[in-house]
Amino acid sequence: MKRTPRNLLIIIVVLSLLISLGNYVNSSKNLDDLAYVMAIAFDVGTSGKYKISLQLSTIESSASESMSSSSSSSGGSSGGGESSGGGGSSEQQTQQYVINTMDCETLDMAINIANAFTNKDISLSHCKILVISEKLAQQGVQEIVNSLINKVELRPDCNIIIAKTPSGEFTEDSEPKLEELISKYYDVASNNETGIGYTKGVKLSDFYSNMNDYFFEPYASLGTVSNPKKNTNNNKDDLSLNTQSKSFSSNTPEPAIESMGLAVFKRDKLVGTLTGIETMCHLLITNELKYCDFNIPSPINADRTIDLYISNLKNSKIDVKIINGSPFVSSKFDVSIKVLSLNDDTLTLTEDVLNKLEDATTIYLSEQIYNYYDKTAKELNSDISGIGRFAAKNFRTIDEWEKYNWAENYKNCTFKVDVKTNIKSGHLLTSE
Amino acid sequence: MESNTKIGFSEAVCVLLIVVISHLILTVPKIILHNQGSSSALNIIYITLIALLITFILSLLYKKFKGKDILDLSGYLLGSKFQFLIGIMYIAFFLFTCSLLLRNTAENLKTMYFQSTPIPYILFFILLVVGFMNRYSLKSVIKCNLIVVPMVVLALLVLFILSFNSFTLERIFPILGYGSGNTFVNGIGNIFVFGNMVFLFFLMPILKDYYQFNKIAYTSVITSGIFVFLTIFALLLMFPLDISSNSNLPMYLQTRKITLGEFIQRVDAFFILIWIISLLSYLSIVMSFILSTFKKITNIQNKTFVSYSFVAILFGISLLYKNVIQIRQLDANLYKYISLFFTFGISFLILLLCNIKHKIREKKKI
């Protein structure tokens, strides 16, 4: 009984502290208080250092989509055209999202301005992609990436895309047609390397990691948006499948994200791009290629091409030796190929045809891999496939490694490529 | 120590493990990776072997003093005044390490989740639990810890296994890091990660079976070594050195990288919860040892009233640090050497001198 007043006092003190804590803790927010960013686009600013576009999902659209997937996506309520305001331009695209674009010095400043536009707290927790314009990437992205990686609410697995088009247009013209939700649309669009093998989704955490690594140089997926309505996809924004055919572009009636190739960085600056086939070689070297379709000139009939389906059999084996101060890189690949083409050349796959195809494929792949090595080493001097990690075993201490300066010596590499090809028929009704 | 408190083998090992794990989550990986670079994993194996050697020496030196803690030993060596001095020194050491860890955790929590909450509030709510726990006996706190440690250990193992996909094995090269001298000579200082061994000097009187002391010591050193190795190894292989050695909380970065398919993402919140519980357990245990030490050197009857005072002192010390930079500098520089001084310096010296005194006395008897 004597302890009752003391316990009471303790309870009162604790309760009063808890109540006063409510003034400081601002985590009690409901959906109405938040505006979720789906994509952030960075470009070179005109009045500020950066032109930053925040693509915000509207609650009304998300709710209607999730509640009635059968209803037409073009119908429904108007999607929050509340994002008007000074300090930047803003426009309502569809009911699914609004875009706030502003010229400012930092991302935080952009978020603050967007807060003022929307009268809501901007949340980055559902952001799916970060789009950086090619022009800005050439100037350097360290400040942006450092700022993004330090944002706890931003998921480190959101993808970075380097846009051939101005990054603002990229988010403006990204209109999901096949997906219900824009977040899902970005998920699919930026992670489609498993489907084609001509590009690779690069996470923010991986990009940051590579930027600070002494084994790797950073890279990001390369993308553009084709919008037939605006006729934005002119030739200069085209993505290329390989060095011969520079005009890869889809001919869709609706705006769509096109992703092909990789953007290659040296530290934080964009130094060049890779084509689709070069990206396939990159994935082959880094053991990230699951499968990919490509075609080679027919070894039987020079006028024809043969479609092949590649998948990795075994991990590539890369070894680096330092000979007379220069790195000698030998790499071995063991790949499995299926023939997809059904033409006169491949309809009957005899032993002789298979051997010819194997030889032709080996030569073609070796050439492509040599080209890839040559381009990354001699032209771009950027070790995006992390050959440096295989060279590190030649050095005993970090001081020796740093003195050698691998990042600069990568261009002096001599490469030896050894490809072993196993061809099988991909046909259902023909024998091997 | 409390006469009615007797703990068994697993409880003692868990006490020693929680000390290592609590520091491992926050500061230890950063310090090791920064000092050793790519040879960090090699260095951990090396210092674990040295720690085992030290444990062997400790077990030899403790042979004649079964059931005696460091306070009993200092009393035996130079009397009650020296015992009082040593007691106060250890209390100050424990308060310093706890305050650093506490403030560091509070700062990290503020950065991650409570951006607008003042630090005193975060500290208060952590210490509220510690104060409440210390109303009960040391045994109750240790029993609670027996539940917490398996949880934390499991979380660390899960974290390691889920990180497999992000490993780049070649990151262990260049194998000697900043050189063989740095790895094997300067690197001996990294034995401070086995700072939990200081509690071996306090556990003896509360052990159910004094003869299990050696087993407890070896088991704790080996298990601690394994966990330190797994953690450092995972961080070394996952991140470039520039990131892992400069990040304020590298293990948090590790948790942020983990996703289980498309369904389970952002598992970092789960690990943070486990880590907060482990911190509470660690602080409660250390506070219990502080109270027991204080009780022994001052002969007070009831330690409950004093416990709130010590919690308040800890709260005050935690607020003394100016900013995060100061805390991290103290962690990287001062904590390491103070921990080495108390764990492998003064404690061993007292034990060694007690052995010499014992031998001289025995010779005189003969």
Image (cartoon, grey):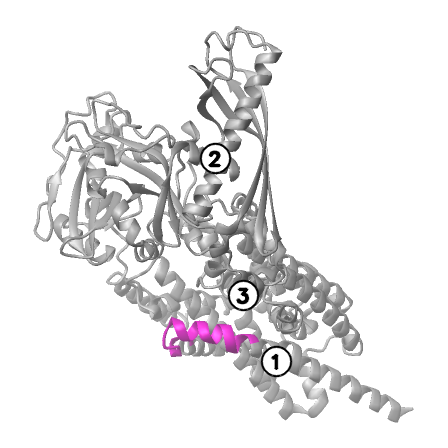
- Give the residue at x 62% y 67%: B179
- Give the residue at x 9% y 45%: A84
Q: Quadrant of residue A212?
A: bottom left
Query: Which residue position holds label 3?
Result: B28
Badges 1 and 3, same chain: yes
- Give the residue at x 20% y 54%: A110
Q: Amino acid at mark 1?
A: Phe
Query: Which residue position holds label 2?
Result: A281
How would you rate the neighbour count of disc 2 (Cα within 10 Å): few for under 14, some for 14-19, many for 20 or more? many
Q: Is residue B330 magenta?
A: yes
Q: Position of residue A404 (x, y in %)?
A: 54, 60
Q: Quadrant of the N terminus of chain A?
A: bottom left
Q: Nearer the viewer, mark 2 or mark 3?
A: 2
Mark 2 and mark 1 in contact (Cβ < 8 Å)?
A: no
Q: Quadrant of residue A332?
A: top right
Q: Secondary structure at mark 2?
A: helix
How far apart are labels 1 and 2 at the CA level? 56 Å
* Mark carried by residue A224: none
Say which of A205 and B112 sits in front: A205
Q: Quadrant of the C terminus of chain A?
A: top right
What range is drawn magenta here? Answer: B318-336
